[in-house]
Image (spheres, helix red, strand yellow):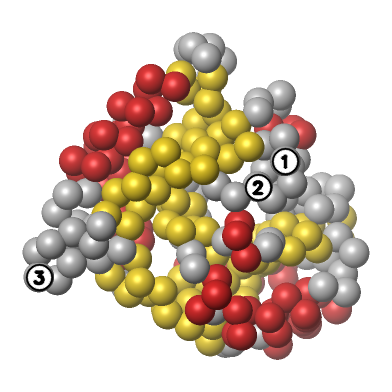
């Protein structure tokens, strides 16, 4: 059984929702910005196959769908941006720049690759599209964590399509489970991962575009970078 199937079976077994995403005040804990390494996603090439998933989820009042400009694959969160070192999880601005440069060096030999986006799935706090790539994104994530001193997050990389914004522990409606199950094998398309961005997210705004601080192109097959 692969990791995505385990996630799905656990969602069915536990049958609960929670308030997911960066808009959860308990997660933000008073912070205004977060910094993360992400893979940007051009939704224009995927929109035709994403729309049926969005339409299926739209009727549920606790579903908050991501707009196109917000779609991305998070590799690892660097921390909450802060003016100086402070509470756990905070990262000063000069440290963010340093992480970007360390990541650029670490990924200098990493080749661009293609992933397949297929299958709707869910965590208690979000609906997402699975990413199938024979572990390439996991390797990319591991390189970043190892060279930047970051903690590898739990769970596989994925393309979040919507947050569930319900009180923690709310029972997942059977209609939601059956809707997601109907699209478990839905093919969305392919995505070329040819760059990584270290981006800031304005946590005060609803679905702001990620603000890229550093763009790191990956190497093409012929040895040249893609940037």
Q: Residue at x 68, y 63 (%)?
A: 67
Instruction: Determine which quarter of the picture holds residue 25.
Output: top right
- Quarter of the image where the C terminus is located: bottom left
Residue, disc 3? 222
Badge 3 marks a residue whose secondary structure is: loop
Decide which of 44, 117 is in the foreground and name it.
44
Q: Position of residue 108 (x, y in %)?
A: 17, 49
CB-based contact (under 8 Å), mark 1 and mark 3:
no
Q: Residues within 10 Å of mark 1 (few under 14, many from 20)?
A: few
3D distance between C-alphas at marks 2 and 1: 6 Å
Query: As drawn, is 62 to the left or to the right of 153?
Result: right
Q: Residue at x 90, y 64 (%)?
A: 61
Q: Position of residue 156 (x, y in %)?
A: 46, 60
Badge 1 marks a residue whose secondary structure is: loop
3D distance between C-alphas at marks 1 and 3: 41 Å
Q: Residue at x 42, y 38 (%)?
A: 213
**Label annotation for residue 208:** 2
Q: Residue at x 68, y 61 (%)?
A: 66
Q: Position of residue 174 (x, y in %)?
A: 85, 76
Q: Residues within 10 Å of mark 3 (few under 14, many from 20)?
A: few
Residue, disc 1? 205
CB-based contact (under 8 Å), mark 2 and mark 1:
yes
CB-based contact (under 8 Å), mark 2 and mark 3:
no
Badge 2 marks a residue whose secondary structure is: loop
Q: Earlier in the sequence, mark 1 or mark 3?
A: 1
Identify whether 76 is placed above or below 116: above
As drawn, the residue found furthest toward the left would be: 223
């Amino acid at each position: 059984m692969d990791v995505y199937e385990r996630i799905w079976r656990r969602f069915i077994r536990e049958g609960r929702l929670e308030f997911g995403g960066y808009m959860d005040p308990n997660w933000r804990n008073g912070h205004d910005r977060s910094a993360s390494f992400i893979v940007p996603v051009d939704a224009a090439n995927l929109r035709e196959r994403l729309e049926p998933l969005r339409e299926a989820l739209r009727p549920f009042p606790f579903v908050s769908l991501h707009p196109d400009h917000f779609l991305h694959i998070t590799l690892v969160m660097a921390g909450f941006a802060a003016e100086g070192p402070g509470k756990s999880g905070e990262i000063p601005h000069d440290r963010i720049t340093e992480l970007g440069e360390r990541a650029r060096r670490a990924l200098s030999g990493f080749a661009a690759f293609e992933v397949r986006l297929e299958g709707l799935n869910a965590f208690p706090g979000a609906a997402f599209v699975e990413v199938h790539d024979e572990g390439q994104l996991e390797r990319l994530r591991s390189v970043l964590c190892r060279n930047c001193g970051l903690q590898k997050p739990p769970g596989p990389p994925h393309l979040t399509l919507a947050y569930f914004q319900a009180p923690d522990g709310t029972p997942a409606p059977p209609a939601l489970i059956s809707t997601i199950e109907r699209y478990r094998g839905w093919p969305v398309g392919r995505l070329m991962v040819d760059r990584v961005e270290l981006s800031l997210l304005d946590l005060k705004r609803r679905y702001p575009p990620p603000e890229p601080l550093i763009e790191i192109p990956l190497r093409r097959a012929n040895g040249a970078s893609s940037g």
